[in-house]
Protein backbone atom coordinates (compact mmCIF):
# COMPACT_ATOMS: atom_id res chain seq x y z
CA UNK A 1 0.00 0.00 0.00
CA UNK A 2 2.91 2.34 0.71
CA UNK A 3 4.31 1.97 -2.81
CA UNK A 4 0.83 2.58 -4.18
CA UNK A 5 0.47 5.83 -2.24
CA UNK A 6 4.01 7.07 -2.89
CA UNK A 7 3.24 9.10 -6.05
CA UNK A 8 0.25 10.77 -4.35
CA UNK A 9 2.29 11.69 -1.28
CA UNK A 10 5.31 12.82 -3.31
CA UNK A 11 3.15 14.93 -5.61
CA UNK A 12 1.39 16.49 -2.61
CA UNK A 13 4.68 17.31 -0.92
CA UNK A 14 6.21 18.68 -4.13
CA UNK A 15 3.25 20.95 -4.93
CA UNK A 16 3.00 22.04 -1.29
CA UNK A 17 6.69 22.97 -1.19
CA UNK A 18 6.40 24.81 -4.51
CA UNK A 19 3.42 26.86 -3.30
CA UNK A 20 5.01 27.43 0.12
CA UNK A 21 8.07 29.06 -1.47
CA UNK A 22 5.86 31.72 -3.08
CA UNK A 23 3.02 32.14 -0.56
CA UNK A 24 4.59 31.13 2.75
CA UNK A 25 1.46 29.02 3.40
CA UNK A 26 1.92 25.38 4.38
CA UNK A 27 -0.41 22.51 3.45
CA UNK A 28 -2.32 24.51 0.84
CA UNK A 29 -0.82 22.54 -2.04
CA UNK A 30 -0.90 19.17 -0.27
CA UNK A 31 -4.56 19.42 0.66
CA UNK A 32 -5.52 20.47 -2.86
CA UNK A 33 -3.58 17.57 -4.39
CA UNK A 34 -5.41 15.17 -2.09
CA UNK A 35 -8.77 16.71 -2.93
CA UNK A 36 -8.16 16.84 -6.69
CA UNK A 37 -6.58 13.41 -7.03
CA UNK A 38 -8.74 11.46 -4.57
CA UNK A 39 -11.06 10.16 -7.29
CA UNK A 40 -8.11 8.73 -9.22
CA UNK A 41 -6.99 6.83 -6.14
CA UNK A 42 -10.56 5.74 -5.33
CA UNK A 43 -10.81 4.16 -8.80
CA UNK A 44 -7.35 2.62 -8.43
CA UNK A 45 -8.13 1.06 -5.05
CA UNK A 46 -11.56 -0.12 -6.21
CA UNK A 47 -10.07 -1.86 -9.25
CA UNK A 48 -7.50 -3.60 -7.08
CA UNK A 49 -9.96 -4.55 -4.36
CA UNK A 50 -12.52 -6.01 -6.75
CA UNK A 51 -9.79 -7.96 -8.57
CA UNK A 52 -8.97 -9.80 -5.31
CA UNK A 53 -12.52 -10.85 -4.44
CA UNK A 54 -12.81 -14.63 -3.87
CA UNK A 55 -15.21 -15.44 -6.73
CA UNK A 56 -13.46 -13.28 -9.34
CA UNK A 57 -12.31 -15.32 -12.39
CA UNK A 58 -8.56 -15.08 -13.02
CA UNK A 59 -8.95 -13.55 -16.49
CA UNK A 60 -11.23 -10.78 -15.18
CA UNK A 61 -8.96 -10.18 -12.19
CA UNK A 62 -6.02 -9.82 -14.59
CA UNK A 63 -7.93 -7.27 -16.69
CA UNK A 64 -8.86 -5.28 -13.57
CA UNK A 65 -5.28 -5.35 -12.29
CA UNK A 66 -3.91 -4.28 -15.68
CA UNK A 67 -6.39 -1.40 -15.64
CA UNK A 68 -5.20 -0.45 -12.15
CA UNK A 69 -1.58 -0.59 -13.30
CA UNK A 70 -2.42 1.67 -16.26
CA UNK A 71 -4.09 4.22 -13.95
CA UNK A 72 -1.13 4.05 -11.55
CA UNK A 73 1.44 4.49 -14.33
CA UNK A 74 -0.41 7.46 -15.80
CA UNK A 75 -0.52 9.05 -12.36
CA UNK A 76 3.18 8.34 -11.85
CA UNK A 77 4.05 9.87 -15.24
CA UNK A 78 1.93 12.92 -14.36
CA UNK A 79 3.93 13.33 -11.16
CA UNK A 80 7.22 13.02 -13.05
CA UNK A 81 6.07 15.58 -15.63
CA UNK A 82 5.15 18.01 -12.83
CA UNK A 83 8.55 17.60 -11.17
CA UNK A 84 10.56 17.86 -14.39
CA UNK A 85 8.54 20.40 -16.39
CA UNK A 86 6.25 22.10 -13.82
CA UNK A 87 3.10 21.23 -15.78
CA UNK A 88 0.59 18.39 -15.93
CA UNK A 89 0.65 15.52 -18.36
CA UNK A 90 -1.42 16.62 -21.36
CA UNK A 91 -2.49 14.23 -24.12
CA UNK A 92 -1.25 16.54 -26.88
CA UNK A 93 2.18 16.84 -25.31
CA UNK A 94 2.32 13.10 -24.64
CA UNK A 95 1.72 12.40 -28.33
CA UNK A 96 4.10 15.16 -29.42
CA UNK A 97 7.03 14.14 -27.18
CA UNK A 98 6.51 10.36 -26.84
CA UNK A 99 9.16 9.56 -29.45
CA UNK A 100 11.72 11.71 -27.64
CA UNK A 101 10.98 10.44 -24.11
CA UNK A 102 13.27 7.39 -24.37
CA UNK A 103 16.22 9.55 -25.41
CA UNK A 104 15.35 12.09 -22.69
CA UNK A 105 15.42 9.38 -20.01
CA UNK A 106 18.76 8.14 -21.32
CA UNK A 107 20.27 11.64 -21.25
CA UNK A 108 18.92 12.73 -17.87
CA UNK A 109 19.76 9.53 -16.00
CA UNK A 110 22.86 8.53 -17.96
CA UNK A 111 21.51 5.07 -18.77
CA UNK A 112 22.46 3.11 -21.85
CA UNK A 113 20.14 0.95 -23.92
CA UNK A 114 21.14 -2.35 -22.23
CA UNK A 115 20.38 -1.03 -18.74
CA UNK A 116 16.98 0.29 -19.81
CA UNK A 117 16.10 -3.03 -21.47
CA UNK A 118 17.14 -4.90 -18.29
CA UNK A 119 15.00 -2.58 -16.15
CA UNK A 120 12.04 -3.05 -18.54
CA UNK A 121 12.39 -6.86 -18.42
CA UNK A 122 12.54 -6.89 -14.62
CA UNK A 123 9.47 -4.67 -14.43
CA UNK A 124 7.67 -6.89 -16.93
CA UNK A 125 8.34 -10.00 -14.82
CA UNK A 126 7.14 -8.23 -11.66
CA UNK A 127 4.07 -6.91 -13.46
CA UNK A 128 3.22 -10.38 -14.77
CA UNK A 129 3.54 -11.89 -11.30
CA UNK A 130 1.26 -9.17 -9.90
CA UNK A 131 -1.37 -9.34 -12.65
CA UNK A 132 -1.64 -13.13 -12.69
CA UNK A 133 -1.34 -13.77 -8.95
CA UNK A 134 -3.99 -16.09 -7.55
CA UNK A 135 -4.21 -14.44 -4.12
CA UNK A 136 -7.79 -13.80 -2.96
CA UNK A 137 -9.20 -11.90 0.00
CA UNK A 138 -9.94 -14.43 2.70
CA UNK A 139 -10.33 -12.45 5.93
CA UNK A 140 -12.87 -9.64 5.69
CA UNK A 141 -12.00 -8.24 9.13
CA UNK A 142 -8.61 -7.01 7.88
CA UNK A 143 -10.21 -5.07 5.04
CA UNK A 144 -11.94 -2.42 7.18
CA UNK A 145 -9.24 0.23 6.76
CA UNK A 146 -9.07 -0.27 3.00
CA UNK A 147 -12.87 -0.18 2.64
CA UNK A 148 -13.08 2.96 4.79
CA UNK A 149 -10.36 4.61 2.69
CA UNK A 150 -12.17 3.70 -0.54
CA UNK A 151 -15.39 5.17 0.86
CA UNK A 152 -13.75 8.42 2.05
CA UNK A 153 -11.66 9.19 -1.03
CA UNK A 154 -14.57 10.27 -3.25
CA UNK A 155 -15.75 12.57 -0.44
CA UNK A 156 -12.41 14.40 -0.51
CA UNK A 157 -13.06 15.51 -4.07
CA UNK A 158 -15.83 17.72 -2.71
CA UNK A 159 -13.16 19.91 -1.11
CA UNK A 160 -11.51 20.97 -4.36
CA UNK A 161 -10.81 24.66 -4.74
CA UNK A 162 -9.58 24.91 -8.30
CA UNK A 163 -9.48 28.71 -8.18
CA UNK A 164 -6.60 28.46 -5.70
CA UNK A 165 -5.00 25.22 -6.89
CA UNK A 166 -1.81 25.80 -8.86
CA UNK A 167 -1.96 22.48 -10.73
CA UNK A 168 -5.70 22.18 -11.49
Image (cartoon, rainbow, N blue to C red):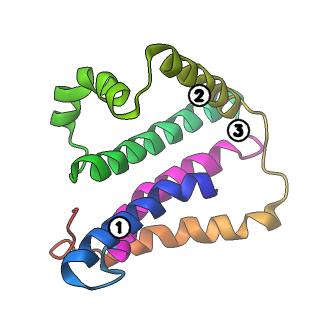
Of pointers 1 and 2, the one earlier in the residue sequence: 1
Q: Does the magenta stretch include residue 41?
A: yes
Look at mark 1 in the image and give the residue it sits on: 33
- Name the disc covering residue 123, or none: 2
Disc 3 to disc 2, C-alpha distance: 25 Å
Q: Is residue 115 magenta?
A: no
The residue lying furthest to the top in this view is: 114
Of pointers 3 and 2, the one earlier in the residue sequence: 3
Q: How many callouts does the rendering have? A: 3
The secondary structure that most of the magenta stretch takes on is helix
Query: Are dots 1 and 2 in contact, CB under 8 Å?
Result: no
Query: Are dots 3 and 2 in contact, CB under 8 Å?
Result: no
**Label 2: how many residues lie within 10 Å, few (<14), some (14-19) or many (20+)?**
few
| Above/below status of 38 relative to 138 | below
The residue lying furthest to the front in this view is: 110
Look at mark 3 in the image and give the residue it sits on: 56
Amino acid sequence: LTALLAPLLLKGLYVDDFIYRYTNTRLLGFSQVLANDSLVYAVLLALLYVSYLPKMPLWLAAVLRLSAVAVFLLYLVDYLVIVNFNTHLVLGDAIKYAAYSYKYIQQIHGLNHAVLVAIALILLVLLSAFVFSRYKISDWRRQKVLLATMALLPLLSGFTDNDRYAHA
